[in-house]
Each structure stands twice: as structure tokens, then as C-alpha cells.
Image: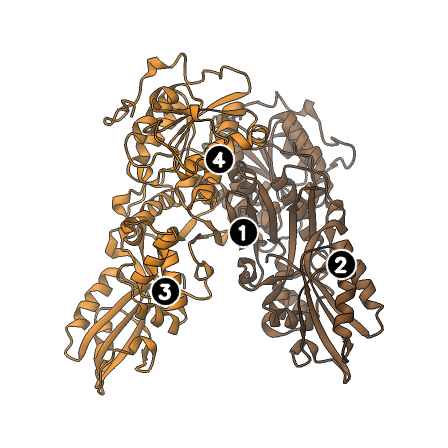
Chain colours: A brown, B orange
Amino acid sequence: MPAAPTSGPHPGVVPAARPGPATDPSPAPGVLRVALLGYGVVGSQVARTLLQRADDLAARAGARLELTGIAVRDARRPREGVPAVVPADLLTEDAGSLVDGADLVIELMGGIEPARGLIHRAIAGGASVVTANKALLAAHGPELFEAADAAGVDLSFEAAVAGAIPIVRPVRESLAGDHVRRVLGIVNGTTNYVLDQMTTHGLELEEALKEAQGLGYAEADPTADVEGHDAAAKAAILASLAFHTRVSLSQVACEGITGITAADVAAAQQTGHVVKLLAIAEQTAEGVSVRVHPALVPVAHPLAAVRGAFNAVFVEADDAGPLMFYGQGAGGRPTSSAVLGDLVSAARDRMVGGRGPRESAYASLPVLPHDAAVTRYQVRLVVADRPGVLAHVAQVLADHGVSIDTVRQAPDEPYAVDVAAGTAALLITTHSAREASLAATVAAVRDLEPVHEITSVLRVEGA
Amino acid sequence: MPAAPTSGPHPGVVPAARPGPATDPSPAPGVLRVALLGYGVVGSQVARTLLQRADDLAARAGARLELTGIAVRDARRPREGVPAVVPADLLTEDAGSLVDGADLVIELMGGIEPARGLIHRAIAGGASVVTANKALLAAHGPELFEAADAAGVDLSFEAAVAGAIPIVRPVRESLAGDHVRRVLGIVNGTTNYVLDQMTTHGLELEEALKEAQGLGYAEADPTADVEGHDAAAKAAILASLAFHTRVSLSQVACEGITGITAADVAAAQQTGHVVKLLAIAEQTAEGVSVRVHPALVPVAHPLAAVRGAFNAVFVEADDAGPLMFYGQGAGGRPTSSAVLGDLVSAARDRMVGGRGPRESAYASLPVLPHDAAVTRYQVRLVVADRPGVLAHVAQVLADHGVSIDTVRQAPDEPYAVDVAAGTAALLITTHSAREASLAATVAAVRDLEPVHEITSVLRVEGA
């Protein structure tokens, strides 16, 4: 590992190492020097394409993109599966020097440090930066965007959200004249695969997860995916872009899919829904609500048809109306496509003197507390099977200002198989209610004598 | 009508009318003057948003966007349904002078002239141009892009293809590092509505079309939609962008939906397909194939779920894999969203000195003749119901090099209701074959003695 700086606001800045100002031209006319930081599944595909499609990229960027080096932790480690087209002597352990000599820097190391320090060093040296590092942006985005702004360079990150799907560019550029009301995203392929398998084959979560691990769709430690942390970082980025305000990861309410059972999925199907893990960003009169949680999505909603490990982002805007962007949210080649799209734009800006859009946070909207979110709920509970119980439960909801849409009592439906004699399964769907009201309501209902169990409480989105 | 020039390569150029060079700054710092040409359903929404969202637009564009005038044919004509927020004194019949005083020109007049002349005049005067005029771009795009390039201004046209859906920007920018293989688009809402109604309610085309006209989804004269001309102009633009080559409207093979019957739709459903009018652009080793025709799309394909008047564009790229972009393809507000996204980008470029992507036609690929397209076919025919007929038909296909995937003989299925006694309905699905081979095959099959009728020949796409 090179001695990459690991702390301070601009830890990697070594301005003296650059021969000139930020607008220092490339050594050869019409050539831009590209430094690649990281050589994993995405980095190796980026390197391959830079070399194999060099002529196309040059024609599109207006400059030849010369891959000057690939920074890795250990250049001598044997590597399998790297593209044969990439010369081994491009590998270097000296990321700092590589960055100092570059016009364009691609950061695919992941994690906070040394990525953060190297990006600051690149920006201070006048290079534009392309990154896929959602964790870094969710944690330190504002500081990095400010540095890029001050230096007049691009810092782009299409690959950080939903892999190959163009979503960052459409939201911040195509919708720049519109008013986005809401974003609903399936932005984690692992959990979508797991939930889809549960839906299609009636599996329990653990079985589906094992299958996903076997197919390489889930990590050995799937925590970041199944607990929703990965989706939360993307939700923070999407909300920031959509509403022109800053949303940090810590402001995202996050609930994963670990509580979802085969019975939940079956009950959802009975009522015409599928269970999806959604990243949700909404703007209301009070501010913005940003959250990740499993939700029931009506089968007729375009998001319900997103199968397997695919991702999709559904956007509702005042003028455009509903839009959806669908594709592969992960994987080396899909993610490399997004990285290279950003790289060509950054190269073009460099050649003609322009800039990509900078951070737009002028709206400075309050991020609402988690329990202020307003949505509909579906509550499944097991109650004593005797007259008056339904009225009793309904009265408790009414007392808390939660209005009931429908109630189903359905002991013969698949989700009610565990209902013992003398009890009945109820499925209550509410109208829109505040999370805080619903939580208080559920607590009160749980305390009722005839209520044996509250089996699940799930939100309904996209209706 | 002002005396707008109507012919010649740069008919509207009056350089002397501009006080300075193309980079002439705005009169007030931080203000860009916007001229709006056309005040129909899209123009009135654009005007409304420019005035109502002025602060947001200024924050996003980096400059105030001042609407300096709206060019109309007759400024004194009474207008209904125009936004109250737009002052009537913005209307002018002098489009030329309005253009001469503008930094940004929005062309929403439609048609070739005077739109073409006014865009040339705007570009020559140093203004960037946003247009939604697909007919103009399909007919005169190269000449306009060259003029914009020479003048160093933006000429953007997101609204010309698929209304509100961001597709121009994703294809030309997000996918700039990828290799697009194929584009399949539902880019005409009228025909998608008609086909969807036929699918859902079993209507004949005329009934569905009347319904669409009643709801305002179809024009009184629906020719441009149902004959596929509207989709063909969009196919030409999409193919040009996707393959970095020039494709003109005249090179697009075009077949509308007028031949589609309720029986075709029913037969499609029997084999797990829906009928969609597709704009198709494909790159093969020989060149590019660009065509518009009705096609059978497997129900599991994401395009099959595109209902009503919605549009969607499905893109297959080497690295990104499959992508789909979905939304409203027409209408005043959706289209205005796309126009304003382009306007904000053009304004930003003007303020920071950059440029949007220019026309990329370096690949200069041959556009293949119509009968060179390769696809699968489903052929329905009525034959004499006796032994050996199927073998006979199959032999004719084999003789022409057309390989059969499946044959169904199904006299009791809905599409075979008209089959008379002593005859049988056959449904043959082929493997991929050249259009030319298939045409010759169908002609030969039609001549066979036991073949009573070839009921339909439909292509299968997206499998």
C-alpha cells in the first residue's frame, strides 16, 4: 500500500506535486491521462473497455483516453480473471503518484479511506473524478462536491446508484426543470432476488438467501444488503439529487427484510401485492422523508414486475408524471458501463472547457423524523373468534385517528394456516396515516384482551 | 406571420441584426433571455413553468431564465386554456426579432418551415436551441447539428423522442462508454393505447381507435400514428444516437398497425405474446437495421407490461445489458418537462462555458435494406385438413432455408373460429430468418394447393 493519507479534510493534497494549475493541459494534444484506482470486478472491466474500445471512446470523448496506471494494494499478487488485454505493468502500488499525473481519475476502491484522500488529491491537482463509491458519497459527499466545485472539475457518480441504470443523470439533468415529488427505488439486487424467489417459489427468507449466495447474488455476509444499509446509502443520494437538498445516510430510516416471512409474502399475494424492499424519498409540505423498508406494492405497479436481481427506480414528477428506469443494478460490466459514461462526459467537459452539473443543495429542506412518514399499512393479527372483536379493534384504530380501508377475516387463506381453533386471522388495510400514529395504534391493539398476536405490520407503497 | 424565410440552407440568418458576436453576453449579469416559438399544448406549459418555477430554475441553471416573448402566428386570436400566469403582452408575431434578441430559443412550432429557418437564425446569432421537433430533425438534423457545432452552441431535443422519458440524454451520454446492440421502443402512445385496448377487451382496431379519439389519445386524422410515421421519425433519431451514425427518416422501413385484427391479438395471447408497435434499431456485422412494425412481444418481456398510452424504450448494450426507460410519451406537461430539462442544461453550459454533446456520427455505418432484417416470424394459415399437408408446408420452408421452431394445429382456439369444415388452422413460429427469405417463403406457401389462406405474418421481437 502506498502511504495514502487517511485523515483531515484534504489529507491527500500535495499541490506542489503538480507541475501547473488546474487547467494544465495534457502532455500530448488530444490525449487525456486516466488513472484507475481499484482493480476488482468493476475496475477490471473498465480497464478492458478503455483498451478494447479506445477508438470509439476517443471519437465520443473528443480525446484519446490513455490508461496510465491501475492502483492496487499489492501489485505482485496473482490475479485470476483479469482481462488479458490489460498489460500487467499498468499495475502500481503508488496510487498517489498515479493520481498526481492524471487528468481523469476513476475511483473504484470502495470504502472511506484511502479513497477519500485520493479523491481530494485528484481534485486539488485539477483532475476530474468518476466514482462508484456510494458509501463515501453518503458519508462525505458535501465536502467532496465543494472541493470539486472550488477546483472547477467534475465529480460524477452514476455508478454509485443502481449500477448500469442511468438514474443520477436523468434526475439531476433531465428533470432539472421539473418538480420531483417522490422516488421509489428497488436499488438492491440481492434483496430483490430473495423476495422474488420467496414470491415465486414460496421459500422462506433463509432458503432464498442461501440460493442467492450459491448464485453469487449475495455475499457470504449479506448484512449490508438484507438490513437495507446498501439501499439506504443510495436513498440518501437519490433524495439529495431529487430534492436539491442534503440528505446524509444517518438521516435515512432503515429497516431490512429479515423480518419478512413466507406467510407475509403469501398474504401480500392474496391482496394483490408483492413484497419489495424500497428506497423511498418523498417531498411533503413539511420537508423530505427518506426511508428504506419492505413494502407491499400493488401487482399492477410497474415496480411489481421487476424480477430477479434487477433494479428499477420509479420517479413521480409534477410535469413528467410517472417515470421508471430499469436495468442491472450491480455486476462488473453493468457498473463499468455507468463509470465509462461518466468518464466520457468528464473528458468532453475537459476538452471543451465545460462542467457537469455541480451539487445542487439550494433548497435546504428539513429531513423529517422517521415517525413523521405518512403511508398506508397492512396489519395482520390473530384474534379471538367471537362477535364484537372486529368492532373493538376498529374502535381502537379510530380512537388513534387511523382510518380503515378494508378488513378481511380469512381463516382459510394461506397466510392464516397457523390460526388455532377459536381464533380468527384479520387483515386490516388502513388509509394513509403517520408512522407515529400507527405505532401507537399497534401498541394499543396488541394490549386488547381478544388480540392474541400481531403477526405483521407492513407498509403499502405505490398505490 | 412575420416574414420568416422559408428556403435555402441558412434561410433565416441575418447576422447584422445581432449587436455582437455569438458569445455576446446577456444584458443583465446572471440573466439569460429565453425566446419561445410556438404556444400550443407544450408551449403554454413551458411558459407557465418558466414563470412559476423561476426561482428553482435560476438556482439549477445558474442564471435567471427570462421569458422575453412567445412567437405565435396570430397574437390577437382569442386563446383558451392558456396559463393565467403568462402575460398576454409576451405574445408576438415577429418570431425573427424575438430570436435575434435571445440567448436560448425553444422551438415548439413543429413542421419544417418556418421552424428550420428560425433555428438557423438562432444558431447563427449565437443562441442555443431546444426543440421537440422530431419531423424536422429526422429530415434536416445533420444540417442543423453542423450549424450548431460551427457556432459552438447547444442544439438539444430530448422532447422529440418519447415525450417526458429521458432517453436522448441516457443514450448519448450515459451509454457513451458502452456498445449499444439494439433498441426496441414503444414510442407512439396512440397505437399502444389502441393495441392495449384490443388486447384487454378484444376490440377490433376501428373500435379501439374510436375510443382513443374520444379520449383525446388519437387525432381526428390518426394516419401519422397508425401508419407508424411518427414512430419512424423517432426510430431514425434513436438509431442515429445509439449507433453514432446518420439515419434519415427515408431509411426507416415502416409498417403501421392497420392490418392488425382482433384475431391476430387473440392468436398472440394464445402463444404467450402481446402485439406492440415497435420502433427497432439494431446493429449487426453488416450495418444497422431501422424499422417500425407491429411485433409479437413475449409476455415476460418488460415491454409487454407497457399499458395504455405509455411509452417505453428498451435498450440492449454489451456492458449495461438490458435497460428500460418508461413514462409518458406525449402531452403538454410531460413534454414540457423534457424541454425544460434541456433548457436548464443549455443555460448552465452558457454560464460555465461548456457544451452539450454534439452530433456523433463518426461510425458512418451502412443502413441495411429493408429486406435484410433478421427476425423470427409467426405465420397463421388455413390449410386442407388431411394427412401430409403439414409436411408439405414444412418442406417449402426448409427449401427456402427458413427453420421452424414450433407448429401448432389448433382448430378450437379463438383465432381459428373462421376455419371451415375440412380445413385446419396452422400457426408456425420460425427461427430467425431474413425478411427476404421469409417473404419468398410466404409467397411459395401461398401457392401450395392445400393452403387456403395465409391469415397473418407477424414478426416476433424481444425473445
Task: Using the rendered view, name the quadrant where residue A18 is placed.
Answer: top right
* Relative height, residue A245 to residue A27 (above, below): below
Pointer 2 and pointer 3 on the same chain: no
Which of disc 1 and disc 2 is earlier in sequence? 1
The residue that label 3 is drawn on is B198
What type is the residue that disc 4 sits on?
Leu
Residue at image position (47%, 32%) is B47
Which of disc 4 and disc 3 is earlier in sequence? 3
Residue B282 point in image, percent of width and height: 36, 52
Task: Using the rendered view, name the quadrant where residue A307 is placed.
Answer: bottom right
In this rendering, which labeled residue sits more in front, label 3 or label 1? 3
Residue B368 point in image, percent of width and height: 27, 50
Do we see residue A285 in this rendering?
Answer: yes
Left/right of residue A9 with respect to residue B434 in the rendered view: right
The residue that label 2 is drawn on is A438
Q: Quadrant of the C terminus of chain B?
A: bottom left
Badge 4: few (under 14), some or many (20 or more) residues near its Cα, within 10 Å?
A: many
Disc marking residue A334: 1
Q: Residue furthest front?
A: B78
Badge 2: few (under 14), some or many (20 or more) residues near its Cα, within 10 Å?
A: many
Q: Nearer the viewer, residue A116 or A20?
A: A116
What type is the residue that disc 2 sits on?
Leu
The residue that label 4 is drawn on is B340
Helix, strand or loop under label 4: helix
In this rendering, which labeled residue sits more in front, label 2 or label 1? 2
Helix, strand or loop under label 2: helix
Q: Residue furthest bottom?
A: B387
Residue at image position (33%, 49%) is B231
Q: Quadrant of the N terminus of chain B?
A: top left
